[in-house]
Each structure stands twice: as structure tokens, then as C-alpha cells.
Image (tube, rainbow, N blue to C red):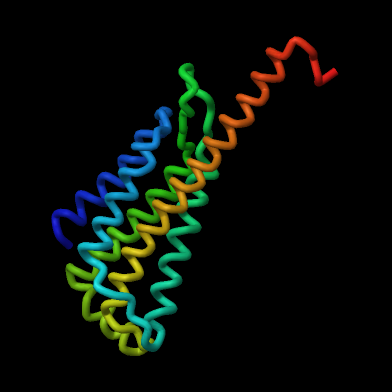
Amino acid sequence: MSISGYLISGVLVALVLRQIRGKRLTMFGLLWPLGLVIWAAVTYLHGIPASGNSLVLTVLGACVGLALGVGCALATAIRPGPDGVPIAKAGALAATLWIVGVGGRLAFEIYASNGGGPAVARFSAANGIVLEAWAASLILMALAEVVGRNGVLAWRARSSLGRQLRELRLSSDPIDRRA
């Protein structure tokens, strides 16, 4: 595994760990992790193998990433900040799901690069998987995890702010329509 791979993994773990204390949810904060995984995909993804079970592995990796990212977002509390910008606070489940995704990819890459490669090659040959499918699966897993998490967080933040604005308008209306 390259130094950039370790750095990307470390940055992605830090992303959620920073939210345990609560962090402003800004457009920049939602987009830079996406830019990071898109850069990794452009750099390391050289196609999606579709032969044998390679496509199944690749789709499975993306689905697992999406499930982990959406689960992480749903386990993150969103509340309004004092200036109206939403605050995202990751709970223990959110951090665990995120670390399982990032840590699982990292553990597999370390295993495959440090002695586990022949075992992965034998498994792949026995199951009709080309070796390039592993890289595609892991990269698409990371991409889907970030897209799922940040997409759901953005949707929840927008929904939360819209609800708060409606409540504010209702409470400041001279005619109480809730009565």
C-alpha cells in the first residue's frame, strides 16, 4: 500500500472522529471528503472488471460501502448551531460503522500487500475473480461510503433547517395558526 493510501485512510477516520464532539456541517465539509475519494478513484481505478464473479465482488463492495455510509449518517445527530449552521455530532455507532469501513479496507490492503497476496490470488482463481476487481471493489466501497454518508447528512441537515424555519415563522406569526 502506498503512503497516499495510508494518508487517505487516516484522513477519513479523522473526519468522523472530529464529529464526535460536534462539528459545523458546511458545504465545504461535505464536499472535500468526496473530492478526496474521487481523486483516489481517478488515480487508482482503471476500470471495472465484469468477467466471472468480478462484477459481483465490485457491486458487493459498493453496496457494503453505501450501507456503512448511510448507517453512519443516520447514527449522527444533527442540531442547529447558534448561527443557524447545523452541527453534526457522530455517536458511537456512527464512529464504529465508519471505522469498520475504513479499517476493513485498510486491513485488507495491508494483509494483501504483506504476505496475504497468494491467498487472495488462490481465492480469486477458485471463484472466478480477476485481481483488479479487488481494487475496484475497495475504491468503489470508499466512494459509496462517502457519498452515502455525506448525501444523507446533507439531506438531513436541509430537512432539519427547513423544519426549524417553518417553526420559527409559525411562532413569530401574529395569528397563532396552531390553535
Quarter location, residue 128: bottom left
Q: Nearer the viewer, residue 116 or 173?
A: 173
- Residue 41 in the image: above or below residue 7: below
Residue at the (39%, 73%) spot, across then down = 58
Q: Nearer the viewer, residue 12 or 91?
A: 12
Q: Position of residue 103 (x, y in %)?
A: 33, 54
Q: Position of residue 100 (x, y in %)?
A: 40, 54
Image quadrant holding the N terminus, namely bottom left
User: In the drawing, does residue 131 fall left or right of residue 84?
Assistant: left
Quarter location, residue 160: top right
Image quadrant holding the C terminus, namely top right
User: In the drawing, does residue 63 fall left or right of residue 46?
Assistant: right
- Residue 68 in the image: above or below residue 111: above
Q: How many marks?
A: 0
Q: Nearer the viewer, residue 47 or 60?
A: 47
Q: Position of residue 139 (x, y in %)?
A: 31, 63
User: In the drawing, does residue 34 fall left or right of residue 3?
Assistant: right
Q: Position of residue 68 (x, y in %)?
A: 47, 55
> Which residue is most to the top?
174
Residue at the (47%, 65%) spot, across then down = 63
> Which residue is most to the front?
174
- Residue 118 in the image: above or below residue 158: below
- Residue 126 in the image: above or below residue 19: below
> Which residue is most to the right?
179
Residue at the (27%, 80%) spot, across then down = 131
Residue at the (37%, 83%) spot, across then down = 50
